[in-house]
Image (tube, rainbow, N blue to C red):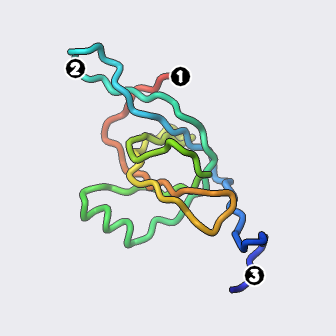
Amino acid sequence: MTWKKPNRPSHEVTQPYNDGLVTVYALEDKAKPGYRPEPMLVKKGVLRYQERTLGITRLYSGRQNQVEIQRILRVPWRPGVSSQDVAVTQDGKQYRIDLVQRVSDVYPPSMDLTLAKVEQKYEVIP
């Protein structure tokens, strides 16, 4: 195995998160019982991220499943983030988290968020 900078004792590569901030929201129903559902976003947390390259394989596998994959973000691992959540980047764009994948061989522990296009914009609770 070749030496990578910076190197850790277990040969993990240090993962930078220098590209910006992403806010993760849970999607909840604010309607009263018996009324039409009114989805709104409830904040779970803010994470730093590094933009990853969207590969051709991932792009076309998403299209086969009628999902328009927009971005891949690598963020520090955080329990509770799931594919049921919505991610909002600093520019205000909303994305549905389509897939959450744990990443090995990097420090600190990280996960990749596959973000899909959202057709409906949700109301955000401050």
Q: Residues within 10 Å of mark 2 (few under 14, many from 20)?
A: few
Q: Quadrant of residue 34?
A: top left
Q: Quadrant of residue 66?
A: bottom left
What amino acid is found at the position of numbered circle 2 in the picture? Arg
Q: Relative to 112, is 99 on the left or the right?
A: left
- Distance of mark 3 from mark 2, alpha carbons? 58 Å
Work out whether 105 lies above or below 110: below
Q: Determine the residue positioned at 26% across, 15% down.
A: 33
Q: Determine the residue positioned at 57% across, 40% down.
A: 90
What amino acid is found at the position of numbered circle 1 in the picture? Pro
**Of helix, strand and loop, which one carries label 2?**
loop
**Among numbered discs 2 and 1, the one appearing first in the sequence:** 2
**Among numbered discs 3 and 2, the one appearing first in the sequence:** 3
**Of helix, strand and loop, which one carries label 3?**
loop
Q: Determine the residue positioned at 25% across, 60% down.
A: 65
User: What residue does disc 1 label?
Assistant: 126
Disc 2 and disc 1 in contact, CB within 8 angstroms = no
Disc 1 and disc 3 in contact, CB within 8 angstroms = no
Q: Quarter of the image for the N terminus: give it.
A: bottom right
Task: Return the x and y of residue 86 as percentages of the image width and height.
Answer: 43, 40
**Of helix, strand and loop, which one carries label 1?**
loop
Q: Pick the residue in front: 110 or 10.
A: 10
Work out whether 43 lies above or below 91: above
User: What residue does disc 3 label?
Assistant: 3
- Distance of mark 2 from mark 1, alpha carbons? 22 Å
Work out whether 70 lies above or below 43: below
What amino acid is found at the position of numbered circle 3 in the picture? Trp
Q: Determine the residue positioned at 47% across, 42% down.
A: 87
Q: Quadrant of residue 114?
A: bottom left
Q: Residues within 10 Å of mark 1 (few under 14, many from 20)?
A: few
Label number found at residue 36: 2
